Amino acid sequence: MRIGVAVSDPDGILATPVETVRRERRPSSAAHLRRLTELVDELDVVEVVVGLPRTLADRAGSAAADAIALADQLAARIAPVPVRLCDERFTTVAAQRSLRAAGVRAKAQRSRIDQAAAVGILQNWLDQRRIAQAQVPPGSDEPAGGRDSLYGEGGDV
């Protein structure tokens, strides 16, 4: 299993790929958590966004439970940096199409697809946050639709 990593510019406008972190299937292995923690420190990350895979029927399955567990484990390691969950539906498909359109061969896509999907997840989250912040009523700290309009159903995005 692989975890794509992306980072935004300091102004939170543009997401760019960083690397792909390998995740062992063995529950006892925490190498991926150590590497993600290192990246948070190295890149001076102020907030982490973890993709939450949901079905087309907007249900959470076993993959979503894995993502939530990863987010919880990472949050325990990097506190007080917040860890948010963001709907990641269609990001891998969009990443594959984007790489194909850029002329990247299928074999080469495997090494880049997770990073490209991470860019899509983070960019979507940044765009949604920017839109929500633009809708903040005067004198309020919350977006017009409240916290849920910014963070989505997963709670912490």
Image (cartoon, grey):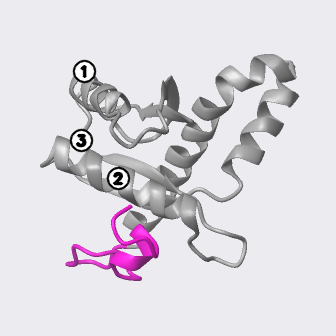
Q: Main secondary structure of the magenta part?
A: loop
Determine the residue positioned at 35% across, 38% down: 11
The boundaries of the magenta stretch are: 136-157
Q: Quadrant of the C terminus?
A: bottom left
Give the label, 1 or 2, closer to the camera: 2
Q: Quadrant of the N terminus?
A: top right
Mark 1: secondary structure: helix
Q: Which residue is mark 2?
A: 71
Question: Residue 46's x, y, as percent?
Answer: 23, 41
Q: Earlier in the sequence, mark 3 or mark 2?
A: 3
Q: Which residue is mark 3?
A: 46
Label 1 crowd (10 A; few <14 / some 14-19 / many >=20) = few
**Relative depth, front residue between 108 and 134:** 108
Residue 86 in sight from this viewpoint = yes
Question: Residue 109's x, y, as percent?
Answer: 76, 24
Is residue 108 depicted above or below 51 in this figure?
above
Which amino acid does the dot numbered 1 rest on?
Answer: Glu
Which amino acid does the dot numbered 3 rest on?
Answer: Val
Q: Which residue is mark 1?
A: 42
Determine the residue positioned at 23% across, 53% down: 82
Label 3 crowd (10 A; few <14 / some 14-19 / many >=20) = few
